[in-house]
Amino acid sequence: MPPTPAELQDLAARLRFDLESAGFAPVPPDREDDEEGGVRVFVSADQVHVAWGVHDRLGEAALDIQDAGRLHEDVVCRYETARAAMHLALGNILNTFGYRTRPQGLGFGHVIVPDQT
């Protein structure tokens, strides 16, 4: 039986607490679109997701350069490196805390697989 909305919200709250214990400051649930980036824990499509968002300054600059076809410029490398490093770190930390994860559909991020016991 799939988790209830309340169970998903409880799982998201536990994730935020565990990530805070690991030294992260998760973005508050009411500020998921925060331009400053950071660890985002959110419920979507009956699943709990964890993702890292870079600051809009870096993200927008990288996207502008990608659109201009200059993929090897420093800002794009910084953007891609930051996203990849944080994706790997988050996955390792989540697994160390005992969460089972699977890759998020598109892009970087993790879907938390709730225990079905």
Image: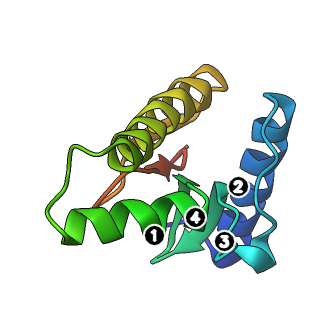
Cα separation between marks 4 and 2: 31 Å
Q: Earlier in the sequence, mark 1 or mark 3?
A: 3
Q: Earlier in the sequence, mark 3 or mark 4?
A: 3
For the question of whether residue 34 can be seen, the reply is: yes
x and y percentages locating residue 5 in the rendered image: 65, 77
Mark 2 crowdedness (10 Å alpha carbons): few <14, some 14-19, many ≥20: many
Q: Earlier in the sequence, mark 2 or mark 1?
A: 2
x and y percentages locating residue 93 in the rendered image: 61, 26
x and y percentages locating residue 73 in the rendered image: 29, 46
Q: Secondary structure at mark 1?
A: helix
Identify the amino acid type marked 1.
Glu
Identify the amino acid type marked 4.
Arg
Query: Which residue matches tag 4?
Result: 57
Mark 4 crowdedness (10 Å alpha carbons): few <14, some 14-19, many ≥20: few
Q: Earlier in the sequence, mark 4 or mark 2?
A: 2
Q: Are marks 1 and 3 in contact (CB under 8 Å)?
A: no
Frontmost of labels 3 and 4 is: 4
Q: Residue at x 49, y 36 (%)?
A: 100
Looking at the picture, tell me which residue is in the foreground, 21 or 87.
87
Q: Are marks 3 and 2 in contact (CB under 8 Å)?
A: no
Its colouring scheme is rainbow
In the rendering, which numbered label is found on residue 11? Answer: 2
Query: Which residue matches tag 1?
Result: 60
Frontmost of labels 4 and 2 is: 4
